[in-house]
Amino acid sequence: MRPADLLRPTAAGLYCPPGDFHIDPTRAVDRAVITHGHADHARAGHGAVLATPETLAIMAARYGENFTASRQPTGCGDVTTVNGVAVTLIPAGHVLGSAQVVVEKDGLVIAVSGDYKRRADPTCAPFEVPRCHVYVTEATFALPVFRHPDSDGEVAKILTAARQFPERTCLVGAYSLGKAQRVIKLLRNQGYDETIHIHGAMTKLCRLYEAFGVDLGPLAPVAAAKQDGEDFAGAVVVGPPASFAEKWAARFPDPIAAFCSGWMRVKQRAKQRGIELPLVISDHADWDELTSTVKEIAPDELWITHGRDDALARWAELEGVEAKPLALVGYGDEEE
């Protein structure tokens, strides 16, 4: 069997013909395998969805209980046979419940990364290295300029700012699923035990994380704190980046605008957003992690779904690995 017979790119995303299912399809399909809960990978309307229990819960929280006609929860490491194709989910280290999809038939193994990172994250299971003939990877930060610093050191900057400017609010922009919970947990791990105020849009997902055993400490929605007379001086407030431009952000006294993203490595991006405290914290693999992962897996072929596929493909070719950019459309649309 050729790799293209087992998995191929289509207008709806990666499709497995013998199994008759899509992986992270960009439009509604009959049968989908979903790597994680971010909206550019997990969409509502599929006939049936196979994913980890965490990802299914995230999809239900975001889209409603009727996001699919049929759910099939599958734990990491469990093998599910779909029309003769063995499907195994293994941790991707991206966000809670994130998984790589390993498909196998007639001795051929293809692993699809979804989005992933290699560094430790106290809110999700760590990345597991797959053994496969073809590795299908993302390439969001596939340029040598993207080398993410230590996340603990970046989070410590929030605490330093709070101590230096007790009259101001530390307003931290972080994506509502994954990044926000990770930053909150890293703050807790550094000894910050004060109430962290959150945007109302994050409440449901933070509660979901806690339901799956991730202790985030005392949290309070901003609206409730405001009703109690809280002026937020010296407080840490976490909200989605888009909220910075809303009336919601105007209530905070002289806020220190911080933004957690791998894109904060690019100083011009921070300047354009008016970010005073750029924090290079990413839930995606950086250049060194991408290249070291490919070396560790040592696949016969490397397929690249989205991102800077040109740079990673060129690097792979120089390393003697056959590389194929798939140029899939519809991924990478969420705030990193």
Image: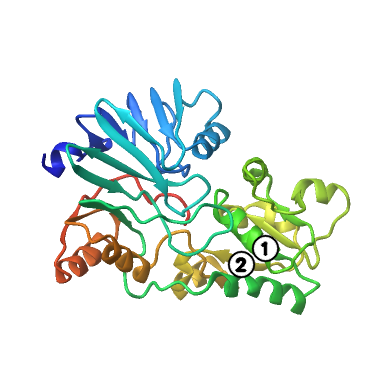
| 221 lies left or right of 79 | right
Label whose residue precedes the other's in the sequence (2 or 1):
1
Residue 20 placement: quadrant: top left
- How many C-alpha atoms fall within 10 Å of the one at disc 1: few (<14), some, or many (≥20)? many
- How many C-alpha atoms fall within 10 Å of the one at disc 2: few (<14), some, or many (≥20)? many
| Circles 2 and 1: CB atoms closer than 8 Å | yes
Residue 270, horizontal then vertical, whole percent = 51, 70
Residue 245 appears in the picture as rendered: no
Q: Nearer the viewer, residue 7 or 169?
A: 7
| 281 lies left or right of 233 | left
How far, Cα to Cα, is label 2 from label 1? 6 Å
| 19 lies left or right of 59 | left
Q: From this viewpoint, which residue is outermost toward the top?
A: 69
Residue 187 placement: quadrant: bottom right
Say which element carries label 1: strand
| 111 lies left or right of 64 | left
Q: Nearer the viewer, residue 3 or 12?
A: 3
Residue 258 appears in the picture as rendered: yes
Q: Which mark is residue 258?
A: 2
User: In the displayed structure, would residue 251 be above or below residue 319?
Assistant: above
The residue identified by callout 1 is: 171
Residue 53, horizontal then vertical, whole percent = 51, 35
Q: Which mark is residue 291?
A: none
Count the labels in the image.
2
Q: Amino acid at mark 1?
A: Leu
Q: Amino acid at mark 2?
A: Ala
